[in-house]
Amino acid sequence: MDVKTAFLYGKVKEEIYVCQPPRFEDSQYPDHVYKLEKALYGLHQAPRAWYATLTDHLLANGYTRGAIDQKLFVRREKDDLILVQIYVDDIIFGSTRAVQCKEFEAVMKKNFEMTAMGVMTFFLVLQVNQDPKGVLIHQGKYVTDTLTKFNMLDSKPASTPMVARPVLTSDSDGEDCARYQANPKASHLIAVKRIFRYLVGKPRLGLWYHKNSEFKLFSYSDSDFGGCNLDRKLTTGGCQYLGDRLV
């Protein structure tokens, strides 16, 4: 779902005044200002005010807010549940029972003007393909657009995104390749182009979430003590799986 004019619903708690819009001044009080009761687009408090208004509405209708991700809301009814994820004025929701989705739409339309987008196929830069076996998430369109922007769509594909043992340093003696950034060198540009060439051959490589995968948590980490070539500090990375589904 998408909320129309979301920021205009938010009620501001601070005392905020704005000038009268140009060419719409009150002829009797041209020097007066307005005190805001609700947020306006462009106001720093607008996103927070909208989120607070939406949160109050969902909590009043039986939803609970996530303890870690506070933009995630959950409602349970016996063995069924509905999950609602908020991203500014875009809302993703799913349930174990279809009727709960209809009920959520009704709850939202009580106070807000909403647009129901249907089954999710695209969100931000993510493309979502759903079928009875599971869900595939990839960034095919974003990858294609990026490769086209930098004229690399017809480049020779690379089998891996980086060389086996990449040694990237500050390369202070290298040739500059851009201005007004953090001083990248030609060697860094070569590394980035290698990633692009990898994407040329795998534009729709994504994450596959099988419907019948087991629900056990596995976590992997890899640490390299002294692995940083610049200051010999620790470098580390990791990933987590629910069954065979990468989180």
Image (tube, rainbow, N blue to C red):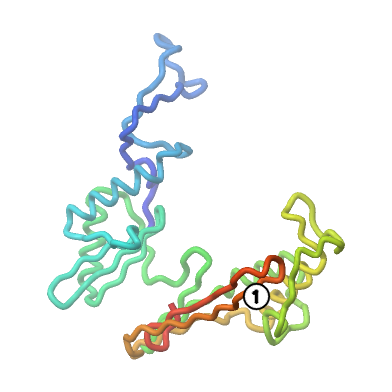
Which quarter of the figure has residue 91? bottom left
The number of numbered badges drawn on the structure is 1
- Percent position (x, y) of residue 151? 77, 69
Q: Residue drawn at (35%, 45%), measured in percent from left and top?
A: 50
Q: Left or right: where does residue 102 sit relative to residue 209?
A: left
The local crowd at label 1, few if under 14, some if 14 to 19, many if 20 or more residues have their Cα within 10 Å, is few
Which quarter of the figure has residue 170? bottom right
Furthest-top residue in this view: 28
Q: Nearer the viewer, residue 69 or 149?
A: 69
Question: What residue type is disc 1 on?
Answer: Gly
Q: Residue drawn at (27%, 51%), measured in percent from left and top?
A: 55
- Percent position (x, y) of residue 122? 47, 69
Q: Is 42 situated above or below 128?
A: above
Q: Residue drawn at (33%, 42%), measured in percent from left and top?
A: 9
Q: Left or right: where does residue 45 sit relative to residue 147?
A: left
- Percent position (x, y) of residue 226? 64, 74
Quadrant of image for the N terminus: bottom left
Q: Nearer the viewer, residue 232 or 83?
A: 232
Question: Would residue 1 be seen by someone viewing this image from the given angle?
Answer: no
Q: Is 20 situated above or below 230?
A: above
